[in-house]
Image (tube, grey):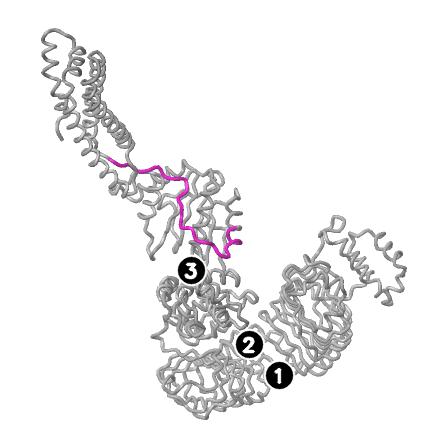
Amino acid sequence: MADPNMICAPLQPVCGFINNTGLPAATARQFSSFFCIKRNRRALTKANEYLQALEKVVQEEVIHETNQNKKCHPLVELWLRKVDGVLVLIDDIDQECDRLMQYSCFCNYSLILRKRYRIGKRVLKTLEDLGELIEEGNQFKEFGSKPLPDLVEDRPRIEAFGMETVLKDLREYFDSSNVGIIGVWGPGGVGKTTLLNTFNNELKECGSDDQVVIMIEVSNSGTLNIEAIQRTITDRLGLLWNDAEAETTRARSIAKALSRKKFIILLDDVREQFDLVYVGIPTPDSQSKSKLILTSRYENVCYQMGVQQSLIKMEYLGKESAWELFRSNLSTKAVMALDSPATNNVVQEHAEAIVKTCGGLPLALKVIGRAVAGLTEPKDWSLAVEATKDDLKDLDGVPAMFNILKYSYDKLIETQQQCFLYCTLFPEYGSINKDKLVEYWMADGLIPQDPKKGHRIIRSLLSACLLEHRKSDSSEVKMHHIIRHLGFSLAGQENIIVKAGMSLEEAPSHREWKTARRISLMFSDIEDLCIPPECKNLVTLLVQNNPKLERLCPTFFEFMPSLRVLDLSHTGITTLPDCKTLTKLKYLNLSHTSIESLPKEFWVLKELTHLDLSVTKALTDTFDNCSKLHKLRVLNLFRSNYGIRDVNDLNIDTLKKLEFLGITIYAEEVLKKLTKTHPLAKSTQCLSLKHCEQMKSIQISDFTHMVQLGELYVESCHDLEKLIADSDNQKASCLQVLTLAELPALQTIIIGSSPHHFRNLLEITISHCQKLHDVTWVLQLEALEKLSICHCHELDQVVQETIGELESKSSGIEHGSVQNFRKKNGFSEEQEIHGMVDDAWDEYNKFYQNMTKSGRINGIEHHVNFPKLRSLVLTDLPKLRRICIPREFPCLESIRVEDCLNLRTIPLGQTSDCPRLKRIFGSYEWWERLEWSVKDIMESKYFIPIQDK
């Protein structure tokens, strides 16, 4: 650039002459502005052109910097404003100079001199200002600077369908002064990032007083990128970044800066545990009032990162939210087709089927919604439905979605991956028993013979959201439809055939069997397997729940030398074909079949570790094969027709590796022998007592040595009168399931005040016990979840509670209150004893309910008798008049009443007593005869009609 001093060069000769004559510089300057106006104007024009060129250069530099996410440097910004102002001033000066030339022709001389003096002075002053601006502009080295960070940066705004509950929980934890770290976990694609973005934007809108909110995308791969995290924090704090600085040094600087602030850090997609100190994040505490919110696919990662009680599980979307999200991704024409008022709207039916296959997974709803966004014709929608069922990966966008979800699979070790792929053998939307799954894995060779190892793998798959808990049954898991299809896409090289739940009537072709390693045909309608397939590589064959399957051809197993897992349960087979070739078989399930005997050469299955013959009601002989299978870990003859009838038949104590024994006993002498210190007692987990003639009582305390006994089934013991569980033994039993069936003499069930033997009892079924009048003792079973009573024709009340008993139990109620109630209703204790108070019972119910609805009775805590009961089933109880007095059922989900024509009330005082109730099964006739007060309380949507027999 030229020297700015050259701009004022025209003034120098004149000023120098005046200075040489001794005149002051100010006078010389005034003289020059008056006499050299033309020369000064020409200099001003040149300086103006130069300044405009310089301004253009500076503007380009500023644009370059702002494109780098910087803002214009404050000094540069001030300079540009000055340049804009002076350029406008130059335009005014040019106009005044032009007018001056016109005035010289028409105005008097004195006016022209004044104007000339004023304009000349302005020209000279502007010329000097331009020189200063040019000099200042030439000195700029930096044209942009980092902007100060906003409190909260805007994140992408996406409508959060169905996240109201999770957002509410997140806000509550966030507002709690005792919570520093909050964790949100859930499967990939469930919307965790959308949740954090929404919460981030809420913080911006509400004007939080926190000094800085930082959202960090932690992982795009399996490796933690500490530098990327540190750079994000540094940028948000407006700190200088030094590439040469070590990560540990930088972490200390970041931690020091954050510790001076109240911060909120949002860590999205934390895939592995890491120490916050390594990246420079101070651990939030109650004093700092800072917060850390993290999301992860893994529950255990949240715990490892310091989340304690403040953990939130993100569930899949409900039906309505899933439908709205799906619709939001469709084209206008497709939505119009969905909303068509046609009576038979086929498009809507197909769309609903597609939404169902997505299982509430937001990522799938978006991807598949966009894949079908332009469809309007029923035929196209029908093809899309088939694609979502059969080969989901053929839809646009689905492979990319699988790639996102696949990370959870990639992080698993190889054994866990193989166990996950094994789960695809089970039917869509079905549940999987955890114990059975582990047994399959062990027999297939995926894991060692250690059930604990298998259950640890299940927990890891649950933590990774590749499996889900089944809410109604903790012993079972399930697999999401989309995750199942992901498994299929990953198992392409595994040679598996999955036809489960497809209602097949014929088995797959020979070609498919020939190369298969695992085959699943469960839950179908196959009638026979008569052609011996050649499948030398077959390891697992699952054929259970084919009720029409009655026979296998005699040579069916001839070409299956590698078979390790065989499940034929719940089929109609009556015989087992020649199985001498199955020398590697480890797992065999024949439960719930009509098999009559085991083959004589069955003993050759020396590798068998699991044999299930439970509920084989036609089995008459095993040819003593079971005692010869010395590797058996599991032997289940529970409720089999084949049982132990003589003490000399109890010869399976040679099975030294036995961990689980299910057994059926036909004689009291055998029971006495087994319940003592018999070697088999400790492994007995399921015990069936059947046709034990002359056995008049059962003392539960006699089962002390059966430390693992989980299920007791007492059936057809016609002389049994008493069941007693009142021992002083403080050791709790493992018993969880109790069934009493076909016991015509049973009158008394005695439960002690501290029912240790029934402390863990979850399920009770009482059937065909004609002399039972009530089962009041169930009130003492605090763990009870399911109560079923069937065909007990003398039962008039489930729980027998007279007013006198209630008075003695409710010591907190003033004695006078009950006496006043008696007096008011005009009946005596004698009338009460004789059961003559039926008409007044309902009024007492109201009285009792009012006394207890607050949860306390005169300062004494109110006790809930059925704290965990989820299901109540009452079938064919013709004399049943009432269940019990109205009381709380905090966990009750369903009531089923069938053929109980005299039952006219259900024991609910108000809906708040039963907050989880969703279903009441019963006939229309019974529902109509219910008391109106009860029907007013209960909503009719709970009622599901059934037909009385």
Provide the residue designation for mark 3: 189
Q: Secondary structure at mark 1?
A: helix
Q: Is residue 420 magenta?
A: no
Q: Nearer the viewer, residue 560 or 731?
A: 560
Give the mark, 3 or 1, whose residue is nearer the N terminus: 3
Which mark is nearer the camera, 2 or 3?
3
Magenta span covers which residues? Answer: 143-167
Disc 2 crowd, CA 10 A, few/some/many (<14, 14-19, 20+): many
Helix, strand or loop at label 3? It is: loop
Residue 255, relative to residue 840: is it above or below?
above
**In which image quadrant can residue 343 be found?**
bottom right
Residue 453 placement, left or right of 930: left
Where residue 374 sits in the image (x, y, percent)?
A: 40, 66
- Which numbered disc covers residue 647? 1
Sequence-wise first label, 2 or 3 = 3
How far is disc 2 from disc 1 in space, using C-alphas? 17 Å
Kindly identify the amino acid type of the residue bearing the numbered disc 1.
Val
The reply to whether residue 787 is in sight is: no
Kind of residue sitting beneath label 3: Gly
Q: Check disc 2 and report the residue beneath it.
A: 661
Asked if the magenta segment contains residue 164, the reply would be yes
32 with respect to 623 (left or right):
left
**Residue at x 38% of width, y 69% of height:** 395
Residue 182 showing in the rendered view:
yes
**Mark 2–mark 1 contact, CB under 8 Å?**
no
Q: Label 1: few (<14), some or many (≥20) within 10 Å?
A: some
In this rendering, which labeled residue sits more in front, label 2 or label 1?
2
Asked if marks 2 and 3 touch (Cβ < 8 Å), the reply is no
Quadrant housing residue 801? bottom right
